[in-house]
Image: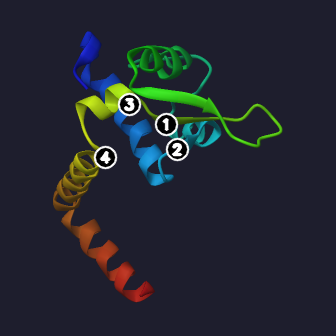
């Protein structure tokens, strides 16, 4: 995620979108991506104080750099699109390395909030 001199906040935005593609079996429907991002106060319309114009950043910058691909969903009656990993993302990392990174981040987050981690573990045990 070093190409183009993009800063850490913008790279973290890209990491989030790439994570959504992995979570959704290698593709992320555009509607779902914007739904997730809007929960982080990053709307498709308007300018974000850190990321700038999000509609420009997501499809144009990262498509142009090859980090993401954007294609119409097959067999969709309406013009529905999805994001996929692009060739530049594959050149910079593999999905396995990326998932290992996400797991390390999750483990650090769990260690940073031990009471919440213990509560989450209890809830998982009760659900099982």
Residue at left offset 76%, top offset 43%: 75
Q: CA distance from mark 3 to mark 2?
A: 14 Å
SS at badge 2: loop
Question: Which-is-in-front pick, marks 3 and 1?
Answer: 1
Q: CA distance from mark 3 to mark 4?
A: 14 Å
Question: What is the x, y in percent for residue 19?
Answer: 39, 45
Report the residue marked by disc 2.
Answer: 27
SS at badge 3: helix
Q: Are marks 4 and 2 in contact (CB under 8 Å)?
A: no
Q: CA distance from mark 3 to mark 1?
A: 12 Å
Disc 3 crowd rating (10 Å Cα; few below 14, some 14-19, many 20+) is some
Foreground residue among 23 and 125: 23
SS at badge 4: helix
Residue at left offset 57%, top offset 28%: 43
Q: CA distance from mark 2 to mark 1?
A: 5 Å
Q: Are marks 3 and 4 in contact (CB under 8 Å)?
A: no
Report the residue marked by disc 3.
Answer: 14
Foreground residue among 104 and 28: 28
Question: Which-is-in-front pick, marks 3 and 2?
Answer: 2
Please report whichever mark, 2 or 1, sits nearer to the chain's N-terminal start.
Answer: 2
Q: CA distance from mark 4 to mark 2?
A: 13 Å
Question: What is the x, y in percent for residue 79?
Answer: 76, 31
- Residue 95 is labelled as 4
Q: Are marks 2 and 1 in contact (CB under 8 Å)?
A: yes
Disc 4 crowd rating (10 Å Cα; few below 14, some 14-19, many 20+) is some
Please report whichever mark, 3 or 1, sits nearer to the chain's N-terminal start.
Answer: 3
Please report whichever mark, 1 or 4, sits nearer to the chain's N-terminal start.
Answer: 1
Report the residue marked by disc 1.
Answer: 84
- Location of the C terminus by quadrant is bottom left
Q: CA distance from mark 1 to mark 4?
A: 12 Å
Q: List the single residue furthest toward the right.
A: 77
SS at badge 1: strand
């Amino acid at each position: 995620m070093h190409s183009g001199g993009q800063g850490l906040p913008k790279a973290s935005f890209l990491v989030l979108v790439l994570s959504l593609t992995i979570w959704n079996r290698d593709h992320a429907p555009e509607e779902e991506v914007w739904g997730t991002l809007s929960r982080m106060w990053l709307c498709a319309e308007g300018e974000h104080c850190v990321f700038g114009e999000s509609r420009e950043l997501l499809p144009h910058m990262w498509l142009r750099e090859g980090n993401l691909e954007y294609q119409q969903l097959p067999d969709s009656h309406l013009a529905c699109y999805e994001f996929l990993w692009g060739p530049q993302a594959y050149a910079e990392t593999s999905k396995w390395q990326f998932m290992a990174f996400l797991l390390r981040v999750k483990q650090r987050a769990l260690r940073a909030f031990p009471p919440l981690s213990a509560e989450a573990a209890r809830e998982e045990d009760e659900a099982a």
